[in-house]
Image (cartoon, rainbow, N blue to C red):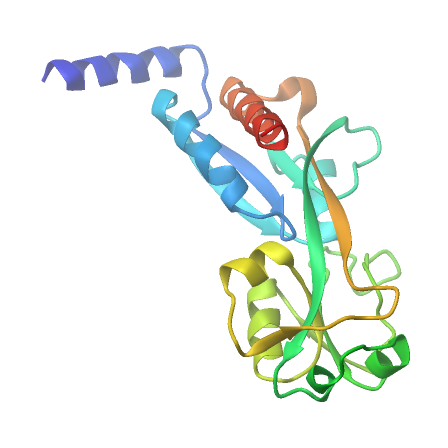
Amino acid sequence: MIEQARDLEAMSQQLSVGVESEITIAMDHLCDPTLLYKPMKEFLKVNTTTSIQIIETSLSKTSEMVTDEEADIAIITLPVTNYPAQVFSLTTMIPVVSITHPLAAQDYVCIQDLAIHSQIVIRDLGRFSSTFDGKNVGWLKANQRITVDNFDHAFRATEQGLGFCRLPEHIIRKRYTEKLKIIKVEHNEKYQVPLHITLPKRSKTGLAARTFYEILLRETYAFEHK
């Protein structure tokens, strides 16, 4: 009962100083979500009145979450104009195919080889994705493309031999399967995408969001300097 009373007192104090009841985190789909878990656990221990909503975004949708101030914290790829951002992490993109795919039989793959096979790509989920404002990343010159909403669909489609795809290394590592093979592509075996973190609401950012933001930065710094 004493412990419950202390918890209620802590909650009352947090509410009295205007701590948000919920904060929204926009996370680009290239980000490894496990980077959020340890900081989130630390945050929730001391912020018992604040819920967290995580929204996975992609390409221009990520930028929209910032410019429309729909998120309290946003993990993005390139910094958005006029929104200060800090380095957060790096995601390595690796080309893979099913072991049953014709490209799996080749020791080395050139760009011309890729062009004649289906490529599995992720759709830009932003509101302007069907226009020239939609964003694209990487090599997209295959004669045929299969477009899906997220990396889970892309992984499954690739595993079934529908085409080749570049997947984040953390997804391949977590979901390793003997059904997939990493292919060596001429001048293009892998590339890295930098991720940044920003506060879309800037000076209007609430106390809880700022606290979580600082924890995320501290954990990122600690990880980089291990």
The percent coordinates of residue 84 (x first, y second) are 77, 26
The percent coordinates of residue 225 (x first, y second) are 62, 27
Q: Nearer the viewer, residue 99 or 38?
A: 99
Residue 53 lies, with reference to residue 175, above or below; the image says above
Relative to 123, 16 lies left or right: left
Can you tell which quarter of the image residue 194 is in?
Answer: top right
Q: Residue at x 67, y 86 (%)?
A: 101
Q: Residue at x 62, y 71 (%)?
A: 154
Residue 119 lies, with reference to residue 34, above or below; the image says below
Tag count: 0
Can you tell which quarter of the image residue 184 is in?
Answer: bottom right
Is residue 16 among the parts visible in the rendering? yes
Q: Residue furthest front?
A: 107
Can you tell which quarter of the image residue 197 is in?
Answer: top right
Q: Nearer the viewer, residue 160 or 78?
A: 160
Q: Residue at x 88, y 64 (%)?
A: 187
Relative to 144, 216 lies left or right: left
Is residue 122 among the parts visible in the rendering? no
